[in-house]
Image (cartoon, rainbow, N blue to C red):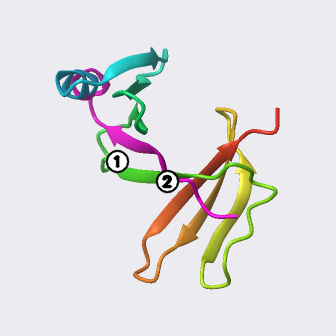
Amino acid sequence: MATEGIEAVFLTTHNWGKSARFFQALGYELEFATDHDSGQLRNGDGPYVFIAEVPEDQEPQTRIVLKVADADGFRPDPAVEVVTPFEDTHYGTRETTVRDPDGRLWSLQAPGTN
């Protein structure tokens, strides 16, 4: 089973409010905000952007997340280095991490097992 394209872009920021307003100015709509300075925005049917505020001593990061329909049915090609197996997340999905030939880490996300 292959991935199904880009699911999301996860961003960390030092200012949740400014980052959310930036994406809203680009046409993204706020789908939800949490009570701990994070939230999700989307522009049409494309991938969502999830933004979470981090302390000033942490460097803001960007992570692209690829979609997988079924974590249990996902069988990557042997050329794909799996760094971490699928694990349940606190936000209701299952995620795994793979490494590309240049050493970049990629997240793959599947629906949770509910």
96 sits to left or right of 57 = right
Q: Who comes first in sequence, dot 1 or dot 2?
A: 2
Eye-nearest disc, 1 or 2:
2
**What is the number of the mark on residue 58?**
1
Quadrant of the snapshot with the C terminus: top right
Residue type at numbered disc 2: Gly
Q: Position of residue 50 (x, y in %)?
A: 43, 34
- Judged left or right of residue 109, residue 106 is left
- Residue 13 in the image, given as x and y percentages of width and height: 31, 37
| Image vertical order of residue 95 relative to residue 101, above or below | above
Where disc 1 sits, the SS reads loop
User: Does the magenta-highlighted stretch encompass residue 60?
Assistant: no
The spot of residue 28 in percent (x, y) is 29, 25
Q: Does dot 2 land on a helix, a strand or a loop?
A: loop
- At a point 81% along the width and 56% down the height, the residue shown is 72
* Residue at 67% over, 84% down: 78
The percent position of residue 92, horizontal first and vertical second, equals 69, 33
Q: Which residues are magenta?
A: 1-19
Judge whether 95 appears above or below 32 on screen.
below
Relative to residue 7, is residue 20 depicted above or below? above
Q: Which residue is mark 2?
A: 5
